Amino acid sequence: MISSYSVPSKPTVTLQPSWTQIYSGETVTVRCEIQGGEGAQWTYEWRAAKLNTPPTSNEYRIIRATESDSGGYSCRGRRDYFFSEWSDIITLTVSFPSKPTVTLQPSWTQIYSGETVTVRCEIQGGEGAQWTYEWRRGQSNIPETSNEYRIIRATESDSGGYSCRGRRDYFFTEWSDIITLTVSYKPKAKLRADNTAVPVGGSVTLTCSVSPSSSSGWKYYWYRDEKSSEALTTQDAVFHSNGQISVSQEGLYRCRGGRGNPVYYTEDSQSVRIGKTGQFKVNEPQITT
């Protein structure tokens, strides 16, 4: 008498861990699951790009994967002379992720006390992987496991070389190259005038700058009169290239630089007093009697 049993569904291939993108040296288990066939004494057949010893169990374990393990995996179950369907193919990709890259946002390596900067770790070819991250500043570890390390209100102690690497289970990427961040005291803007007196019908050119010249990203804000906190507009001056304006009104002028979002301001420059060119009075001849 032939015993009856239900026809099992098409097998399913799953991965443990569930990532289809893995990296050289990782371990992954490919598993064949037959729903509706529980309790049956199955043997299994596998098809794949590389099977050194074709397994007959429902698991195929890849230890220290290499790129040659990449490819499509499928399976079917066998019991006596009965075969299930072949499963759909699941594709496994094995690669070696590139060395991580450390970037800065904003991109300035020279920043100043009180500024905020984000150090970011980027792994090309590792998108979608469940990475945790390790960080170093110099030889010291940083307690951060995400791909971003945010420095708020930087101080000089935040200066140094930053590097990172990615970790997934027991797999580690290389350490990135080092990017060096320098934090200096808050700078003071410098104001220069090409003349301190406005010629009749003319103007004076003012130039604002922030040292060192290697620092970048500055926009410049201009003020007239010592107590004024309202920046000059195009109604008050002619704006040339960033950091230079022309003025035709007398007054006490100063400037400062600002950059980033939220805006970080330098200290105000020294003030420069701009006056008017004196008008010469012609003496009328005296009439004598």
Image (cartoon, helix red, strand yellow):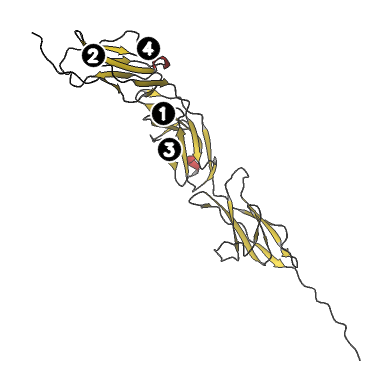
Q: Name the residue under label 1.
A: 166
Residue at point 43%, 32% (across, down)? 135
Percent of width and height locating residue 284: 85, 82
Q: In this view, does 176 lie to the left or right of 254?
A: left
Q: Amino acid under label 4?
A: Lys
Q: Amino acid under label 2?
A: Gly
Q: In this view, does 282 lie to the left or right of 171?
A: right
Q: Does dot 4 land on a helix, a strand or a loop? A: loop
Circle on res. 77: 2
**In the picture, residue 200 is in which quadrant?**
bottom right
Q: Is residue 89 left or right of residue 83?
A: right
Q: Do the residues labelled 1 and 4 touch (CB within 8 Å)?
A: no
Q: Mark 4 points at which residue?
A: 50
User: Nearer the N terminus, badge 4 or badge 3?
Assistant: 4
- Mark 4 is surrounded, within 10 Å at the Cα level, by few (under 14), some (14 to 19) or many (20 or more) other residues, namely few
Please tell me whether residue 273 is drawn above or below residue 83 in the rendered image. below
How far is disc 1 from disc 3 in space, using C-alphas? 12 Å
Q: Mark 3 points at which residue?
A: 148
Between 126 and 162, which is closer to the camera in this rendering? 126
User: Nearer the N terminus, badge 1 or badge 3?
Assistant: 3
Q: Does dot 2 land on a helix, a strand or a loop? A: strand
Q: Amino acid under label 3?
A: Glu
Please tell me whether residue 13 is drawn above or below residue 235 in the rendered image. above
- Mark 1 is surrounded, within 10 Å at the Cα level, by few (under 14), some (14 to 19) or many (20 or more) other residues, namely many
- Mark 3 is surrounded, within 10 Å at the Cα level, by few (under 14), some (14 to 19) or many (20 or more) other residues, namely some
Of tags 2 and 4, which is closer to the observer? 2
